[in-house]
Amino acid sequence: MPSTTTIIAQPAQLMPAYNPIKYIIDNTNKNEPGFRYIFTIYPAAGSHIPANVVAQYRVLPVFSTGYGEQDISRLMQSLVTWKFESGQANESWYKYDVDLGYEYIDNINYTSDLSPDGLNTLIEYTAHGFQVGDQIVITQADGGDANPALEGLHTVITVDNANQFTVNVLWSTITDDTINGTVTYADLRKTQVLSDSLITNKEVFNGAYSIGIYAQGSFPSADYLGTTDPSFALTSLSNPTNAIYYSSATNAATFYQSISQIEQYLIMFRIYSGVTYDVSYYTTVGDNLLSSNGLAGVDGLYNVAVWDILNNINQDFYVEITGDNGSVFRYYFQYDDRCPINEYNQVFYLDRMGSWQSFNFQLRTYEKGQITREMYNQHVDGEVVSSKWVYDSTAMGNRTYNTNVSYSLDLNTNWMDQYNANRFQELLTSPQAFYYDGTTDGYRACTVEATGFENFRQKNKILIKQSVTIKLALNTPING
């Protein structure tokens, strides 16, 4: 059977899960009674059987166009998450198929004149599909004014052939045999086609794309698929294509000297099975600093760590990831050799596109604690001394039964340029953040205590620095 579905619009091959992921289709049966478009989501490369259904949507036609429209972004958001470590990061990626189908209430619209079949009434319709004993509902074009006995619920009593059937309505009650009508099953059974058309191997990742502060703009999927030179990684870091222009590290994220022994950035990008990727570090004048060859993995996403592996980065540099499929990813970093007051106050945060960036808070840090106590006023037994009741010296009326202490840190950045000032607002709005504790060489989950921000502009404020308060995500246990 030829497809009756036309695809009007569909998302790009690779899409951020937190942007609209909308399918729009049309169907030639959309004017049938009880019509619904059906969108069925399956994992990619799997059997399209009921046990594998991820989600299914039944959608009414849009009033103005008759199209079926479905945004599946909320579903996709529940299927991806983040991974805070280098290596394969397929937790942040999902691949799926979409079956496009439809359903409507079974019916026929007869236009041939009614005729007698013995004492009863015969209806003609090519390949009507009814069987003896079927309960049917007849709705006439005039509402039953001419033939009231034929209007409503009836039974099929004979089927002469595939094109004729007789109902239990006396022919003597028919006054106008030219009235057209619609016949449906009394139980409103439906014609259902779940896979009239198929869309395969669509991909989503844990990201949210926008043009600066504006939500508008279509996602340039081809740039992020990792098959071209240049290719974009799944990060909000700038990816310049002109190495000469960026030789002075303009529009480059900061790389901090004092904490060069830990990962400062985790850049997530699309990789493919069977492709080998090389990770190389270069100074901005083109000198090779370090190469890490043979990076490979299964189809999906990968987190590449940016850090000073051999302690030989001492100037502005860029990281280049090249695949033998022709892909080239390039990201620039500005080396910061300023003397810090605090060396290890670094906060990692999930950026808008799913990679991990960081800020080092080199100036003064203030540690604060917030204490909450839950108390009740209990009965005081006291004691009797010299025939008099008195309080015992350790008597306790107000008793504390639950004490909690949470820690927060007030952090201050060093002076920064406009590009890094723009990056800072992502830290303030990021849903996931980790604080690096240099004293224990460990990462601590935290939340950023900010309800608003100002994105400073150098035209308004030449010297830019920022402050932020973070709260550790785990409270310190207190005994009782």
Image: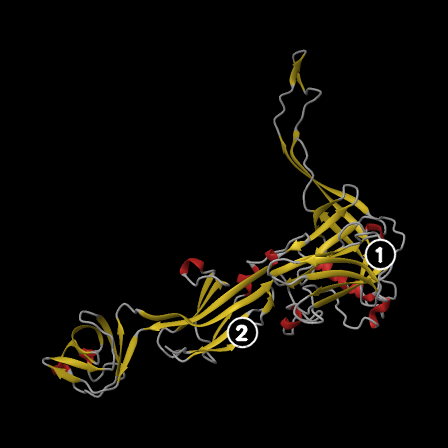
Determine which residue is flagged by label 1.
313
Tell me the SS state at disc 1: loop
Q: Which of marks 1 and 2 is nearer the N terminus?
A: 2
- 467 to 457, vertically: above or below: above
Q: Where is residue 91 in the image (x, y as percent from the top left)?
A: 59, 56
Q: Position of residue 39 (x, y in %)?
A: 45, 68
User: To which quarter of the image does residue 393 belong?
Assistant: top right
Residue 336 placed where, x, y %? Answer: 86, 57
**Residue at label 2?**
10
Q: Which of 266 and 465 is in front in this view?
A: 266
Give how far apart the Cα atoms at labels 1 and 2 are: 45 Å
Quick one: which residue is furthest to the top in this view?
386
The colour style of the image is: secondary structure
Seen from this angle, which residue lies furthest left? 118
**Type of the residue with mark 2:** Gln
Which of the two discs, 1 and 2, sits closer to the camera? 1
Q: Is mark 2 on a helix, strand or loop?
A: loop
- In this rendered view, identify the residue nearer to me: 437 or 242: 242
Question: Foreground residue, 294 or 22?
Answer: 294
Q: Can residue 119 be seen in this view?
A: yes
**Could you tell me which residue is drawn at 38 percent across and 79 percent down?**
31
The dot on residue 172 is none
In this view, the residue in front, 371 or 204, is 204
